[in-house]
Amino acid sequence: MNRPFFISISDVQRPKQARLVALVASGLASFALVSFTYVGLVMLTIPENGIASTYKWLLLEHAPGSRIIIDSGSNGHHGIDAAELTQAFNMRAINVADNAGYSLVDRSRRILEFARRGDVVIMPIEWQGYSEPDGDAGYARLSLELVTEYFWAQTPIERARRILTTPFPIVARAFWRNIRKRGSWEPPLLTSEAVHAMALRHVEAMLYSSGTGGWANEVSQGVAKEALEAGCFRTTIGSRKETRSGRVREAFKLLRAAKENGVRVVITWPTVVGNDCYADETRVSQRAEQVRDLASQAGLEVIGNPADFWMPMSLADDSFYHVTQRGRSIITRRLIGLLRDAGLTPVAGAPPEKLIDTMSKEIFQIELTRAEALEPTIVPLDLDEFAAGGPGSSKIDYTAGWWPPEPRGRWARTNEVALRVRPKQPAQTLQFRLISAFEPRNVTVYINSFEAGKIAIDMARRDYEVNVPAAALDDPFWSIRLKGDDRPLMRPRDLGDSDRRSLTFFFEGLTLTGEAGRRDD
C-alpha cells in the first residue's frame, strides 16, 4: 500500500486572508465595545465629591498662599510636624500624607493638579510606594468608592486603566455599593444634613490635628504582634520587594511637570522605627540608589539618606512607620536641617495665620454657599414668638458655623455664623439671646447682606436687639449673619479643659418684635 507518511500543507485549503482580517477586526471591535461599556457603566456610579471627602484634600485644595506640602503615606502623617516647618520657614505647612497603600502615580497626579507655583512639596514615600506604585487592593476599592478625588484627578485614559486593571471582584463590589448608596442611576441630591455633616467632619479633623492635617500620639499604642513577628525590615523595605521602574518613572514624570509649573518637589526618605529596619545595609543602599537614579532621570532633587529618618524601637507608636510625638520632633528637626542645607530659607514678612483660623473660614464659606443654595424647610415665625436654639427647632435653619444643638441652644464654632428664618409678617426689630465665650466681643449683624447693627456681647446671658433694614422687610426669608471680631479661635482645651471644640458664643434663640408696615415700592 502506497500511503504517505505526512500530509503536505499544499493539500490543505488556506483560509482567505480577507476573512481572517475581518475575524480579527470583529473580535477587537467586540472587545473594545465591551470594555468601553464596562468602563462607562462603572464610571457612572463613582461619586464626584463636590465637597472634599477628607480634611487633607480640603487643605490641599483650599489652604491659601504658598505652602509646604507633606505628601506620602502615614509615615509622613505621624513623622513630620507641619507646625514646626511653619515656624522654621515662615511659610504655611500642610500635611496631606495619608496611607502607604495609596498609588504613587495617583498621588503625583494630584500634586500636579493642586500644587501651585511657589509651593514646596516634600515626599517621604514609603518603600512600598516604589514596589507597588499603583497602590494596593484597599486603595483600589477606596478610590472607586470613598476617596474618589484620587480617581477623578486622573486623566480619562488613567481612569479607564484603573477600572480595567483592578480585579473584577473589587470593581463589582464598588459598583454595587455605589448603586446602593445612590438608590438609582441618578446622582444623589445634596441635602442640608449632608452639608452640615461634611462641615463638622472637616472641623473635627482640623481641630484634632491642630489644623495641619498631621498627628502623632504622645504615648505608644503598641505595634501589632503579627508585625513584630515579621520584623521592621521585612515589613518595610523587604528582601523581595523590587522597584517597578516603569510606573515610578510615570509618577516622577508627573512630578517633573509640577516642577516645571513652579512647584519645588523634594523626594526624601520615609520614617521607619525598629531595631532591624536597615540591618541589611547592602539591600538598603541598593533600593535607595534605584530611587535616586529614577529621580535624577526626572530632574527631581533628593535630600538626605534613609538612615536620617530611622528611629529606635523605643519611639515606635503602633507601626514600623509611625513614631510618637518625641520621635516626630526629632525627625522634623532633622528634616529642617536637610532642607536648609538644600537652600530652603525662611520667607520674609509676617507669620502666616494659624491654620485653624484660616481653615475655619474656608469651611464656613463652603458650608454657607452649599447650604444657602438649598431651599429652607422651616415654618413661619410669628411676632413675639421665641424661637429656641436647642434641638427640635423647626423655625430656624442653621446654615453655617454651628456645633450640634445642646438642651438650651447651640455654640458657634467660628467668628462668623449664619442662620435663616421665615418671618410670618414684617418685624421692626430682631432680638438675640447670646453668651460670649471666654471674653467680650463685638458682633455685626447682617440681614440679607444689609447691615442691621452692631452689638457688644459679654459672658452674661442677655438679649441684644437690632433694627431690621427696610430693604429686607418684604423678603420671604431672612438670611442672618452674625460676624464677630476677627480674632484667633479659642478652645476650652487651651485653658486646661478636655473640650477640643472651638467656641465663640452661645446662641439660645431669637425673637421678632414690633410689627412693621411693608415697604412701599
Image (cartoon, rainbow, N blue to C red):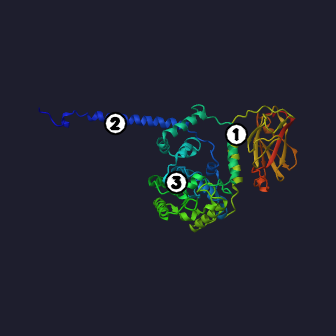
What separation in Å lies between label 3 and label 2 (alpha carbons)? 40 Å
Extreme residue toward the bottom, this view: 341
What separation in Å lies between label 3 and label 1 (alpha carbons)? 41 Å
- Image quarter of the C terminus: top right
Count neighbours of disc 2 (C-alpha within 10 A) and say few if under 14, some if 14 to 19, many if 20 or more: few
Residue tagged by mark 2?
24
Vertical position of residue 400 compared to residue 91: above or below:
above
Vertical position of residue 2 compared to residue 466: above or below:
above
Asked if labels 1 and 3 touch by Cβ distance under 8 angstroms, the answer is no
Count neighbours of disc 1 (C-alpha within 10 A) and say few if under 14, some if 14 to 19, many if 20 or more: many
> Is residue 66 in sight in this rendering?
no
Q: Nearer the viewer, mark 3 or mark 1?
A: 3
Point 64% across, 34% down: residue: 189
**Hey, which quadrant is residue 191 in on the image?**
top right
Q: Earlier in the sequence, mark 3 or mark 2?
A: 2
What separation in Å lies between label 2 and label 1 (alpha carbons)? 55 Å
The label shown at residue 371 is 1
At label 1, which amino acid type do we have?
Answer: Ala
In this picture, residue 123 sits left or right of residue 372: left
Give the percent coordinates (x, y) of residue 225. Answer: 59, 53
Residue tagged by mark 3?
128
Q: Earlier in the sequence, mark 3 or mark 1?
A: 3
Give the percent coordinates (x, y) of residue 7. Answer: 18, 36
